[in-house]
Image (spheres, rainbow, N blue to C red):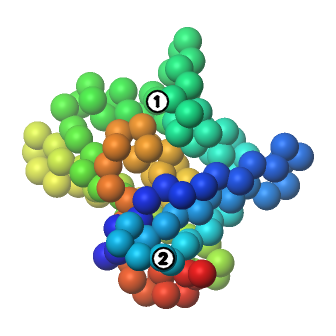
Amino acid sequence: MIEMTFFELRLDETGADQIIILKEKDGDRLMPILIGYYEAQSIHLAINDVQVQRPLTHDLIVNIIDALNARIIRILINQLLESTFYARIFFETPTGPVDVDSRPSDAIAIALRTNVPIFVAEEVLEQVAR
């Protein structure tokens, strides 16, 4: 697993291509991921610390996790299959560790709200790094 940091969000106002770029924490490799418009907007709000009156979807998810006395410990982008990335969110819960399947864009939106580390499997990074 390679730890990554948020590097850049590229928004296209026409809704065509939204791209998030992760950067290797202790290196120079960059990893671009195409994401949906609404996920990009959610990430934009998180990185700019924009507060909204009512919780949006990713805020709601974080609130539910907190209400269940669970804690996110990391996210991992673990697979790339047929040009689609897959991710897992790892939790610490009162009953033990749990991990769930996630789209990388959702996992990143949640990670940015909770300040948890973002990891990428080495084999995934090797396939797409620039």
**Residue farthest to the top?**
53
- Cα distance in 3D space between marks 2 and 1: 31 Å
In the rendered image, which quarter contains the C terminus?
bottom right
Secondary element under disc 1, as helix, strand or loop, is helix
Q: Is residue 4 above or below residue 60?
A: below
Mark sitting earlier along the chain (2/1)? 2
Residue 15 % position (x, y): 83, 48
Q: Residue furthest right?
A: 14
* Labelled disc at residue 80: none
- SS assignment at label 2: loop
Q: Is residue 110 above or below residue 120?
A: above
Q: Residue at x 64, y 52 (%)?
A: 9
- Left-right relation of 33 to 106: right
Q: Is residue 14 visible?
A: yes
Amino acid bearing label 1: Asp
Residue 120 in sight in this render: no
Answer with left or right where residue 70 lies relative to residue 4: left
Reading the image, the residue beneath label 2 is 28
User: In front: mark 2 or mark 1?
Assistant: 2
Q: Please report the residue visible at 35 percent of the width from the left and 72 percent of the height from the top.
A: 26
Query: Mark 1 sits on what residue?
Result: 59
Residue depicted at 61% across the width and 39% down the height:
44
Whether 86 is drawn above or below 68: the answer is below
Q: Position of residue 109 (x, y in %)?
A: 50, 45
Q: Position of residue 56 (x, y in %)?
A: 55, 27
- Characterize the local packing of mark 1: few (<14), some (14-19) or many (20 or more) Cα atoms within 10 angstroms: some
